[in-house]
Amino acid sequence: MKLLVIGHVVHKYHNQKYFGYGPYVKEMNLWFKGANQVTVVAPLTFGKGPDPIDLPYQHSNLTLITVPEFSINSPKSIFLSLLKLPNIFFKVWMQMKDADHIHLRCPGNMGLVGTIVQIFFPSKIKTAKYAGNWDPQSNQPFSYRLQQKILSNPSLTKNMQVLVYGEWPNQSNNIYPFFTASYSESEKLDLSPRELSIKKKIKLLFVGGLNGGKQPVLSVKVLKSLIDKDIDAQLDYFGEGPERTTIEEFIIKNKLSHRVKIHGNQPADKVKEAYKNAHFLIFISKSEGWPKVVAEAMFWGCLPITSPVSCVPQMLGYGQRGELVGDDLEGISNKLEFLINSPDLYSEKVMKACEWSRQFTLERFEEEISALLARQEN
């Protein structure tokens, strides 16, 4: 099978291998197992080695067709994109023509191009992974809404299964609730007991990009609020991004350097150890699909304190397996204080979170992908 992947993830070439964002590449390597030839159409950056979080593709017959990055966020970027798009559309068209199975990664700019071009290949077997927020009631950018409209329209999108996070009412027949995974069956180790007490140090954790959409500054403000209540707490950040400077300034201003450590991007094993040792994940993101960091934290008994976006309420059992909060600092702080003073309730939620998350292993994920591809082929 000739598998074609259209996506927006920026790749790097190093030691004769293509690297990309680790969690994404880890998943794609599972998709590749059923193909004897793989073509990826995506951007490639030069002169920059892989980050610690990046991973290489694993396939002996893989070709990367490079396209330029583009955006449509301003009049200038739209104009520049119009100059690039004819060549991008042509490349995507030519690769779709030769593919046996077309796989789109949405939402994103390249996902939008793929979503439009696939209309002209109704007989091709196709899948799309919509890794963003599929909630019909959510506020989404126009380009995301357009991708949703096309993908869920049986007149425009034929012969395709669209994989989305969560279960939503009144969906077309080609919409298929799906999940993602980070850990294997062999990693289902017993949880290390974590004593939770107002008299003991409380370990908070943030994992993710340090950008405005994920509100990482709010996590350090939560830490300060707990300290102001005489709760001994610390916070570890794993991730990198433009908000790092703001966080560092807040740390200096409030004399929290002995309470906060910013680790930057780190390999998955180091992040896993952080989950194992932390009491709470503080992750108040504005928009997500299936936030892997929430599911990963649950897997290792780190209770998520997170925002009710996308399918996150479903993941948390509407509060049975974690806490759903807005961006009200005092409200978050009060919930944490309540749980710290209710260790039995905390332990109950942790165990429920762990039990739920450990359903979704890499082995099950690979089985679901294989079954999906088999259904499509037949």
Image (cartoon, rainbow, N blue to C red):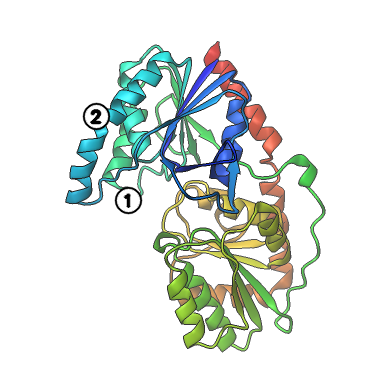
Rendered location of residue 83, percent (x, y): 21, 37
Question: Along the horizontal axis of the image, is 372 left or right of 310?
Answer: right
Rendering coords of residue 345 (x, y %): 69, 67
- Tag 2's secondary structure? helix
For discs 2 and 1, the disc positioned in front in the rendered view? 2
Residue in the picture at 80% in, 65% down:
193
Q: Crowding at label 2, few (<14), some or many (≥20) Cα neighbours within 10 Å?
A: few
Image location (x, y in percent) of residue 148: 35, 35
Compared to 121, does 39 lie above or below?
below
In the rendered view, would you say 47 is above or below 378? Answer: below
Q: Does residue 32 appear left or right of residue 194 in this picture?
A: left
Q: Which quarter shows the N terminus?
A: top right
Q: Which residue is mark 1?
A: 139
Quarter placement of the C terminus:
top right
Closer to us: 113 or 341: 113
Tag shown at residue 281: none
Mark 1 is on which residue type?
Answer: Asn
